[in-house]
Image: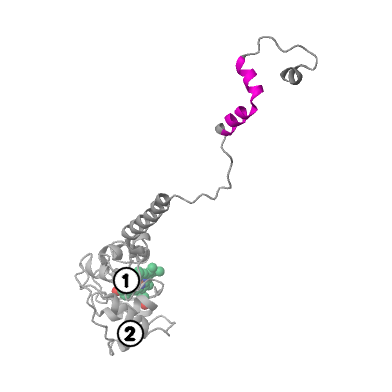
Amino acid sequence: MSERILGRGSQPVKGSSEAEEKLRAEPSELVAAVTREMSEPTDGLAPTPVGLVLFFFVLAGWAGYYLSSNSGGFNANTYDEHYAGRANSPEVQTPQDPMVLGRRTFNMCAQCHQENGLGLAGTYPPLSGSEIVLGDPQTLARILLHGLHGDVTVAGAVYNGEMPGWDRLSDIQIASVLTYIRGTWTNNGSPVDPALITAIRDQTATRTQAWTWAELREAAKTPVSIPITNAPPPSK
Ligand code: HEC
């Protein structure tokens, strides 16, 4: 029979080994070898190993824990160094040093009132030694929020200029800059509470005009009350 498969009239190949002969004789052994070496491909619906599933659960849990313990409470405070929320915002838990924030905010004032707080004679009134700066904080809050124009006497000299309002600054920034100008140079005034700025801002919400000094004298006769907070007084 092997002669018929191989030969078709030719002679059987000389020297063919015994094993070849055997395979030709018993093809089932060849089939068995092939099926042993190559596994059948399957449809890939094998269940995910439980250990792997658990591992990802643990990983997700750890990631959540890591985020929540390192996020700084997702406070804008933590991420934005220019952030100074409103005084009544619950996000503001760590009070910034008002003298530091105030010093930074003062950069916006220094172009007119000068770094040394002495102003420019005849044009910009001094803040250092000014009885207005050392006076009623409510008046200061009003000046800062809406500006000042018309005659005003500071340290014995009359000025008649235009001071812009700064209501785009936050309550904390305004309170800080006031705390700063009251507590630096030769000045030795008390710090200003951001809650006061909040109260004055609410009271004057409809105002659009800058104040005149006469209007400020009038407004100062009805002092606003500010809520008592548990916050410690700003350090100097
Ligand atoms: C564009 C110039 C300019 C800038 C900027 C400016 N001021 Fe004034 N400020 C004035 C002028 C002018 C007056 C006087 C207004 C008047 O004559 O009625 C004044 C008045 C004042 C007064 C009352 C008078 C006094 O000297 O005590 C205070 C307080 C004050 N400014 C604080 C500030 C603070 C704080 C800032 C920064 C947030 C600031 N100003 C930014 C021009 C400026």
Residue 94 quadrant = bottom left
Q: Is residue 208 above or below residue 68?
A: below
Depth order, front residue of 91/52: 52
Element at label 2: helix
Give the percent coordinates (x, y) of residue 195.
29, 78
Q: Which mark is residue 216?
A: 2
> Is 46 on the left-hand or right-hand side of 116?
right
Q: Residue at x 39, y 78 (%)?
A: 146
Give the percent coordinates (x, y) of residue 82.
37, 62
- Mark 1 = which residue? 172
Labels 2 & 1 near each other (Cβ < 8 A): no
Q: CA distance from mark 2 to mark 1?
A: 22 Å
Give the percent coordinates (x, y) of residue 13.
71, 12
Q: Hey, what amino acid is under mark 2?
A: Leu
Say whether disc 2 or disc 1 marks the residue closer to the N-terminus.
Answer: 1
Magenta span: 18-35
Q: Hey, what amino acid is under mark 1?
A: Ile
Figure quarter occupied by ligand 1: bottom left
